[in-house]
Amino acid sequence: MDFDLTEEQRLLKESLDRLIGDRYAFEQRKSYGQAPEGWSREVWAQFAELGLLGLPFAEKYGGSAGGPVETMIAMEAFGRALALEPFLATVVLGGGFLRHGGSADQCAAIIPKIADGSLTLAFAQTERHSRYDLADISTTARRDGTAWVLDGEKGVVLHGDTADKLIVTARVGGSQRDRDGVGVFMVDSKAAGLSRRGYPTQDGLRAAEIVFSGVRVGPEGVLGELGAASPLVERVVDEAIAALCAEAVGTMSAMHELTVDYLKTRRQFGREIGSFQILQHRAVDMLIALEQARSMAMFATMMASEEDAPVRRDALAAAKVQIGRSGRLVGQQAIQLHGGIGMTMEYKVGHYFKRATMIDTMFGDADHHLRELARRGGSVVAA
Amino acid sequence: MDLRFTTEELAFRDEVRAFFRSALPASIRDKLLANKGLAKNDIVTWQRILNKKGWAVANWPVEWGGTGWTPVQQYMFQEELQLTPAPQPLGFGVTMVGPVMIAFGSEEQKKRFLPRIANLDDWWCQGFSEPGAGSDLASLRTSAKRDGDHYVVNGQKTWTTLAQHADWIFCLVRTDPQAKKQEGISFLLIDMKTPGITVRPIVTIDGGREVNEVFFDDVAVPAENLVGEENKGWDYAKYLLGRERTGIARVGFSKERVRRIKELAAAERVGDKPLLEDERFREKLAAVEVELKALEMTQLRVVAAERNRVGNKPDPASSILKIKGSEIQQATTELLLEIVGPYALPYQPEHDEEERWNEPPIGPEWAGPIAPTYFNTRKVSIYGGTNEIQKNIIAKAILGL
Ligand SMILES: Cc1cc2nc3c(=O)[nH]c(=O)nc-3n(C[C@H](O)[C@H](O)[C@H](O)COP(=O)(O)OP(=O)(O)OC[C@H]3O[C@@H](n4cnc5c(N)ncnc54)[C@H](O)[C@@H]3O)c2cc1C
């Protein structure tokens, strides 16, 4: 058992911290968010330069063959920075589909471009009715000669408005909520018949509603096993959940620090408000929630590459439950302990609160995963 | 003990309900139902409808336009407003500065201002908090120096709700910097059009424009705008803050929320059944309903006790109503967030008339305000005295600790 980072991982963390320190002050973030794309190409290029965009990929594709721990380190730093760039969408989700479902040709064609920063991806999965059910898909893919034709609508596609290519789940068989009959396709976002409506999200990122009407995809755009792609989707989503857990820990630790600092500096009734015991205990409750979340983010990182799918799924669900609950407590108390200032757009803590809230709604909120754990009779504690 | 309302009380409630249903413009009700922001004009329109009916300032003495209703009737009126839902009469005038003027103001002030409050000819805002004086309100520093027949005001107020619409602001100002901090404060009425006043908006985390900073730079205020006696302002402020006993818990508002939650959860499907039929969700909703019912009963006990009150001493029980009421409001917004699921994410600003989102909605048409409402509702445990401060009050005033 070893919770310490290796020398290389420590260096990665340090270079990330330096980059974030230089490039991600609150005011800088604001200006990136106001750019038309909603994030900074310049920062993205620096991510590429540092090797971040190739972290999880094989060396032959320009990657550095990192594992879930490296992704965790990066995501936690992005959480602290409230980074706006499409790392989750491109590297974790898009890259995940290529790593686990891409042919050698597909990987060779796409991954080097992810790693050098010249191509971004997004995962078009959610539909209006599907909530958090990955198999609830009514978008269809119909065979036409050697090609496939996609029809349907996808929503809240994170960074879908700027992605060069979209990874799309569609039904090739079965009925709306069947786990069987799912296919995954990689589509050029400029393809004929594809239209996108981009918009800002509550937490300052970008997303899109996407309509596919008769969009043609060649055989080179099929990822994984057609009609039996649900295990692939679940696996990639589990990796994304692990990444989100790490990001959430970054947001929570930042909120906790800001709050403790505020308790030490804000004075009312002639003394620091941190001298009131009720507020001390509240800050301690936040710390406990944060540490429980950090532990579960580590568990998620460890289990993300578990080959036994049901065991992996339960582990990631459990982690997401903890993250959702801790995030809510830490976020709400961070605002409360700041008083009025916590309610303002001008101050950083509210932005963390919003991001933590939105992380809960991505790939299943705490209640969804509790429900799923219970339904599967899942248990994450070995007897 | 008889926990039922009398036949007369029930008849009164029906009358109020019927009037609200028929008199409230549908466009205003629809905005409230959907958690959308009201425009200034919506609030003014409704206030004038109430004023015509003679119900604009229901809680005031009859001679100033009040209704003379019993505490139970006052309670029912509030509850029906929230249930309809209809806009609350602007509290800064009707429940704050109006009653203070009635209790402590001069005859001229009452004649000049009270009818205009009732008809919302003057929009009032509350200038108490300052950057350095939030929970510790008595440490406020905005100063008013007497100079002949007027005061010269300098300093800054903050978190001033809807100051952007305001014609007048009632302020706590320091008139005696030498005195003990509670004893050097006065209560001053200031025309927002006076030279030297600057209003700067503060955007809240949901993107809303409801609070402001208000700066005073050598603002000349006629001495006749002092309420009551100089350096007695703290007493008037305490009177104001502790007076509101009905409505503070927002029971009617939360009941209406629960109704809305049920409606939306019945339409939202999880797997093959409505979310409302999901056991986990139902249990959480039921738990909120139990809390809400208990709060309603607690509120009724406070209302009933009004009959036996002497004087106008603030009732520490109102702190219980404020704490529980805010917690329940916050819990309902968490349920709404759960209902909307992934479609919490799109940011579709909808805050004021001028900036209304004119594009087709993203996701379910009701989704837009859900996350902003969740974010914004964090304020209810902060403003009007934070929940921590309310607990301090209870510990001191009820428990004697
Ligand atoms: C949306 C909104 C609208 C508002 N509208 C108005 C308005 O119209 N007019 C107006 O005058 N004001 C208004 N306020 C201000 C509001 O009354 C103050 O925010 C509130 O009194 C808290 O003060 P503060 O923000 O300075 O927080 P602080 O007093 O700095 O409190 C910070 C934290 O410390 C805690 N704390 C402070 N003292 C103690 C203690 N003794 N024991 C335990 N805990 C303590 C608080 O509970 C809080 O958690 C508004 C505020 C908001 C958020």
Image: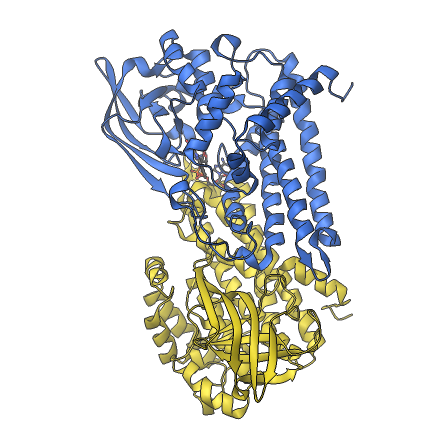
Chain colours: A yellow, B blue
Answer yes or no: is residue A342 visible: yes
- List x then y, in percent, for residue B90: 47, 27
Position of the N terminus of chain B, as image quadrant, is: top right
- As displayed, is residue A110 above or below residue A12? below
> On the picture, is A232 further left or further right than B234?
right
**Total numbered circles:** 0
- As displayed, is residue A25 above or below residue A273? below
Closer to the camera in the image, A82 or B133: A82
- List x then y, in percent, for residue B241: 49, 24
> On the picture, is A104 further left or further right than B289?
left
- List x then y, in percent, for residue A101: 58, 84
Position of the C terminus of chain B, as image quadrant, is: top right
- As displayed, is residue A208 above or below residue B400? below
> On the picture, is B272 further left or further right than A167?
right
Closer to the camera in the image, B141 or A241: A241
- List x then y, in percent, for residue A134: 64, 69
Answer yes or no: is residue B57 visible: no
